[in-house]
């Protein structure tokens, strides 16, 4: 295994906030790039004010949400609303190989950070912009997050149960998976192009276009079959059963601490997802359940029969799972060749999942204010050039002096004047 990280020597000016931009720059940093995160005390990243926080701690530097998206970066506190702030921004762009931004086009224009502005100071810059709906068009300045983008991109229409309102995906899928991943691939492609030609380029990743690209099956179904897919709950056409089934409830630790007896504890739902695609898996499920008489009913013998009687099928399986621990159900069914997985809580994933533990996915880093906390490790591994998290997230403006002195080559007097003028602020 090489000790040298693959992107060492690559310099990133991260002018983004909240999700897509910071997560993209985080991935570049995990594989060796030096990332300078630009923020301002006059208007810090809103993610810094959002929970979860460590017990008894609050403030801009202890948000678990923010810290998880920004490990390994240097924090420069810079007021871009002042002319001198924008001059310093250009000096940072001149230093950088990559510029990352996910503000709306109007904000980018107001700060003078368009691609045309940047190439005047660094003709070879790779500038990645990830506005919600693109740099032009009638909706170019629409604001929002993944929760807003989900219904616009078509996700919400497909999520939930057919007899209920759309559930949506929250901010999760567009913000944390699709858009950062696509942006990272585009940046790496642009880097390769620059190494071959010496020329940079502008990357425009409209988040809506990046997001709708994951809905190919629904679009193909409409194109080929004229069918508009809608919410189907947990069911799919080619499997039965295919759902999450109720299991034994567990007591909530909070209520235990309050000293309530068993009858007063509300308990927490636990579930196990079961998916049967083949007749062999169906036989395995029947054996795991002890081959009850209803399993031998001819109406459940084929996939077509199970689909036609799915409500009754799910009710009977639920009666079997209801008094059993979710992980016991999972282990038993897997031993019989049936695809099954306990619906895990955050605590399960972080503390109890033996597979993630064995692979060391979660990385614990010491933060000066938040203390020792868990971070997501890199989401992929390269056998020859693996990435790694090298330090915790920065406090707001923690490296302002260091960046000005070592990267921007300012002297102490200039730095002091800019601090006094609230440019470095």
Image (spheres, helix red, strand yellow):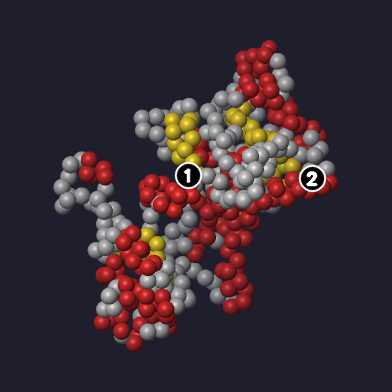
Task: Measuring from the top left, give residue 145's x and y in whole percent.
Answer: 54, 47
How far apart are labels 2 and 1 at the CA level?
Answer: 34 Å
Label 1: which residue?
362
Q: In terms of secondary structure, where does tag 1 sit?
A: strand
Is 317 above or below relative to 279?
above
In the image, what residue occupies the spot 41% across and 52% down? 354
Task: Measuring from the top left, give residue 40's x and y in whole percent.
Answer: 58, 28
How busy is the neighbourhood of tag 1: few (under 14 within 10 Å), some, or many (20 plus)?
A: some
Task: Measuring from the top left, give residue 26's x and y in whole percent.
Answer: 59, 41
Which residue extends farthest front?
1
Towards the viewer: 144 or 185: 185
In the image, what residue occupies the spot 26% across and 53% down? 250
Instruction: Tell me if 121 is positioned left or right of 360 in this view.
Output: right
Q: In terms of secondary structure, where does tag 2 sit?
A: helix
Towards the viewer: 383 or 182: 383
Q: Which mark is residue 194?
A: 2
């Amino acid at each position: 295994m090489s000790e040298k990280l693959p992107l060492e020597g690559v310099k990133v000016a991260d002018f983004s906030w909240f999700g897509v931009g910071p997560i993209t720059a985080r991935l570049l940093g995990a594989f060796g790039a030096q990332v300078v995160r630009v923020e301002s005390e006059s208007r810090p990243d809103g993610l810094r004010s959002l929970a979860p926080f460590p017990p008894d701690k609050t403030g801009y530097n202890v948000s678990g949400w923010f810290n998880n998206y920004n490990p390994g970066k240097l924090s420069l506190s810079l007021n871009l609303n002042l002319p001198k702030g924008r001059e310093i921004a250009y000096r940072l762009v001149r230093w950088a190989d990559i510029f990352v931004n996910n503000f709306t086009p109007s904000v980018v224009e107001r700060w003078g950070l368009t691609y045309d502005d940047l190439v005047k100071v660094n003709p070879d810059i790779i500038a990645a912009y990830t506005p919600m709906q693109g740099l032009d068009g009638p909706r170019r300045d629409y604001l929002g997050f993944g929760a807003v983008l989900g219904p616009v991109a078509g996700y919400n229409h497909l999520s939930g149960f057919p007899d209920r309102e759309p559930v949506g995906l929250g901010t999760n899928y567009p913000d944390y998976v699709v858009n950062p991943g696509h942006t990272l691939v585009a940046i790496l492609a642009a880097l390769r192009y620059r190494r071959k030609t010496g020329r940079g380029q502008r990357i425009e990743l409209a988040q809506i276009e990046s997001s709708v690209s994951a809905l190919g099956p629904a679009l193909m179904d409409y194109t080929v079959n004229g069918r508009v897919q809608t919410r189907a709950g947990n069911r799919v056409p080619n499997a039965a059963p295919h759902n999450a089934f109720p299991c034994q409830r567990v007591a909530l630790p909070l209520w235990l601490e309050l000293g309530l007896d068993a009858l007063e504890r509300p308990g927490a739902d636990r579930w196990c997802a079961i998916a049967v695609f083949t007749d062999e898996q169906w036989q395995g499920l029947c054996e795991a359940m002890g081959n009850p008489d209803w399993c031998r009913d001819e109406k459940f013998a084929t996939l077509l029969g199970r689909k036609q009687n799915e409500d009754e099928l799910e009710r009977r399986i639920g009666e079997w799972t209801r008094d059993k621990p979710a992980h016991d159900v999972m282990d038993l069914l897997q031993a019989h060749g049936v695809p099954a997985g306990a619906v895990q809580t955050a605590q399960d994933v972080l503390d109890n999942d033996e597979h993630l533990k064995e692979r060391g996915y979660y990385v614990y880093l010491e933060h000066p204010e938040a203390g020792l906390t868990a971070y997501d490790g890199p989401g992929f591994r390269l056998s020859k050039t693996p990435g790694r998290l090298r330090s915790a997230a920065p406090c707001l403006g923690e490296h302002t002096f260091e960046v000005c002195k070592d990267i921007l080559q300012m002297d102490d007097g200039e730095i002091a004047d800019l601090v006094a003028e609230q440019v470095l602020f």
